[in-house]
Image (cartoon, grey):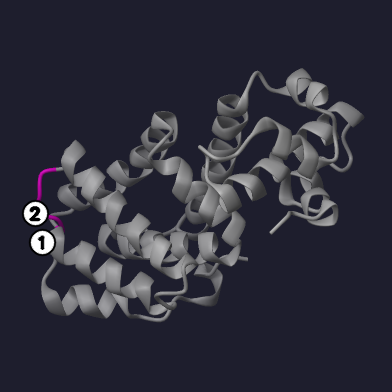
């Protein structure tokens, strides 16, 4: 299914750049187009030609802004991940309890990513192909897990393997939701499993993971 020009030009990056200069607006259009192409075709199958076509620019214009496909993929993925992280941080600015933070982060991450499926697909496909993205995502997660250890809530050693397993659980849930194989309950299911893995008692893990999110905690 082809990406329409209207959809490519009406993306989030283009919206953010609408008051900037022509060069910035073109760059933003290319990034929005890349999100759609990566989400639809996957990184390996995507091409510079298709990204340029979706953004309604010439291939030469693409190369004025990005060195190659890897460069635009990296910038797009890091910008999306940064936006998601900022939204999560804003929702939890006054929350110190590590159990609550960990559960809420997983659930909100899935809601945000599934609320904008193209972003969700782009994130999912980039998580395993871009080390810089995995490193950025791991830094936020590691901080909350170490907070839980300090608070005596988590009984595990926070190391790279734990981070990888934790991330894989969230990625699997995201894939299931984007594919329509799971509903909104996937966030609570995964959050409960993650808390149990961290050593949280079953009753507390279930109560935290399945508690309705407060309106202010939901992505806007």
Classify mark 1: helix, strand or loop.
loop
Left or right of residue 17, residue 79 in this image: left
Q: Position of residue 68 (x, y in %)?
A: 63, 22
Q: Position of residue 96 (x, y in %)?
A: 34, 57
Q: Pick the quarter of the image with the N terminus.
A: bottom right
Closest to the observer, 98 or 58? 58
Residue with the mark numbered 1: 199
Question: Which badge, 2 or 1, is on the more N-terminal residue?
Answer: 2
Q: Can you tell which mark lies on residue 155? A: 2
Magenta stretch encompasses residue 155: yes
Left or right of residue 116, residue 174 in this image: left
Numbered label tally: 2
Classify mark 2: helix, strand or loop.
loop
Going 22% across and 50% down the picture, which residue do you hit? 165
Q: Can you tell which mark lies on residue 48? A: none
What residue range appears in magenta? Answer: 153-157
Q: CA distance from mark 2 to mark 1?
A: 5 Å
Q: Are marks 2 and 1 in contact (CB under 8 Å)?
A: yes
Q: Pick the quarter of the image with the C terminus.
A: bottom right
Q: Position of residue 59 (x, y in %)?
A: 79, 26
Chief secondary structure of the magenta portion: loop
Magenta stretch encompasses residue 9: no
Going 55% across and 27% down the picture, which residue do you hit? 70
Going 41% across and 81% down the picture, which residue do you hit? 212
């Amino acid at each position: 299914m082809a990406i329409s020009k209207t959809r490519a030009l009406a993306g989030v990056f283009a919206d953010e750049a609408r008051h900037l200069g022509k060069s910035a607006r073109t760059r933003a259009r290319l990034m929005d187009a890349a999100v759609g192409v990566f989400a639809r075709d996957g990184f390996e199958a995507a091409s510079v030609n298709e990204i340029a076509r979706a953004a309604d620019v010439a291939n030469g214009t693409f190369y004025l802004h990005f060195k190659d496909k890897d460069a635009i993929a990296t910038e797009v993925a890091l910008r999306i991940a940064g936006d998601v992280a900022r939204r999560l941080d804003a929702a939890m600015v006054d929350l110190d309890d590590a159990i609550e933070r960990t559960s809420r982060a997983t659930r909100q991450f899935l809601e945000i990513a599934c609320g904008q499926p193209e972003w969700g697909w782009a994130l999912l496909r980039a998580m395993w192909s871009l080390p810089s993205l995995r490193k950025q995502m791991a830094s936020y997660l590691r901080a909350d897990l170490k907070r839980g250890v300090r608070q005596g809530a988590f009984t595990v050693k926070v190391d790279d393997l734990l981070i990888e397993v934790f991330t894989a659980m969230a990625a699997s849930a995201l894939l299931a939701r984007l594919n329509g194989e799971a509903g909104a309950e996937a966030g609570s299911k995964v959050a409960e499993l993650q808390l149990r893995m961290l050593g949280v008692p079953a009753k507390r893990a279930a109560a935290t993971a399945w508690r309705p999110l407060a309106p202010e905690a939901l992505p806007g």
